């Protein structure tokens, strides 16, 4: 099974969630676009945190500036279009990590990440981190995905349990909760392995 990992915004825990899910499934991991932090990219982090069961694939675009892909690509003189992306053919599962949220632009002509997801029709796992306003951001993200008929596997919550927040999101959306990632003082291979073991039963249902 292939899954897209996307979030309700920036810095909500997509890369950590991607590593945990990839480890749980023994999957290949692919981040199509990396903007900035090329010395320690998200692919490098996932490779460091996971074991040999996880295969980290090369990015399609490596952009130098840590900013929205459309602006970073423009600075680098790179043109990004829908036809530039081909889903890698792998043995087993594939985890695809997006960047930022659904409406992040990939070029100056208006191509958005959600356009890729709509084109691919791969089930999405939505990462929702608890903060003031996260209910609104989560419900808007779900509404956007549903409006495009993009399949949603479920929601991953990041942070300590917040029953009031989680229950209303699940009730309004009708989605399943896949799991919860606790806040960690340090994200390392031990943390990823432990969390992968904890969520693995979900994917065996």
Image: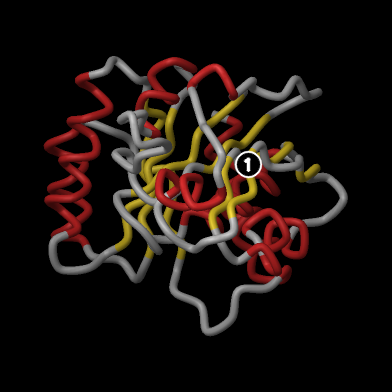
Disc 1, SS: strand
Residue extending farthest to the bottom is: 185
Residue 72, compared with residue 92, is above or below; it is below
Out of 87 and 46, give the one closest to the viewer: 87
Point out the image quarter for the C terminus: top right
Residue extending farthest to the right is: 52
Examine the image and state in which quarter residue 16 appears. Answer: bottom right
Residue at the image position 35 percent from the left and 32 percent from the top: 112
* Residue 138 relative to residue 84: left or right: left
Residue 196 on image: x %, y %: 63, 54
Residue 116 on image: x %, y %: 44, 25
Out of 175 and 49, give the one closest to the viewer: 49
Residue at the image position 23 percent from the left and 22 percent from the top: 146
In the picture of the structure, the residue carrying the numbered disc 1 is 61
Residue at the image position 37 percent from the left and 24 percent from the top: 115
Out of 175 and 151, give the one closest to the viewer: 151
* Residue 198 relative to residue 181: left or right: right
* Residue 170 relative to residue 114: left or right: left
Q: How is the image coloured?
A: secondary structure
For label 1, the crowd category at 10 Å Cα-Cα, with few meaning under 14, some 14 to 19 and many 20 or more, is some
Examine the image and state in which quarter residue 46 appears. Answer: bottom right
* Residue 190 relative to residue 138: left or right: right
Residue 93 on image: x %, y %: 69, 29
Residue 92, compared with residue 189, is above or below; it is above
Point out the image quarter for the N terminus: top right
Residue 86 on image: x %, y %: 64, 20
Query: Total label count?
Result: 1
């Amino acid at each position: 099974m292939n899954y897209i990992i996307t979030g309700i915004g920036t810095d909500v825990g997509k890369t950590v969630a991607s590593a945990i899910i990839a480890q749980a499934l023994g999957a290949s991991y692919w981040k199509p676009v990396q903007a900035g932090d090329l010395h320690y990219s998200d692919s490098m982090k996932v490779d460091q945190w996971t074991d040999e069961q996880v295969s980290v694939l090369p990015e399609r675009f490596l952009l130098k500036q840590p900013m929205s892909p459309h602006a970073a690509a423009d600075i680098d003189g790179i043109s990004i279009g829908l036809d530039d992306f081909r889903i890698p053919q792998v043995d087993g599962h594939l985890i695809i990590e997006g960047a930022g949220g659904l409406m992040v632009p990939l070029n100056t002509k208006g191509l958005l990440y959600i356009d890729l997801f709509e084109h691919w029709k791969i089930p999405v796992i939505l990462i929702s981190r608890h903060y003031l306003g996260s209910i609104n951001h989560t419900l808007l993200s779900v509404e956007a995905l549903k409006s495009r008929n993009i399949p949603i596997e479920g929601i991953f919550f990041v942070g300590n349990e917040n029953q009031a927040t989680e229950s209303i999101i699940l009730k309004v959306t009708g989605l399943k909760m896949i799991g919860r990632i606790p806040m960690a003082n340090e994200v390392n291979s031990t943390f990823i392995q432990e969390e992968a073991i904890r969520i693995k039963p979900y994917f065996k249902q």
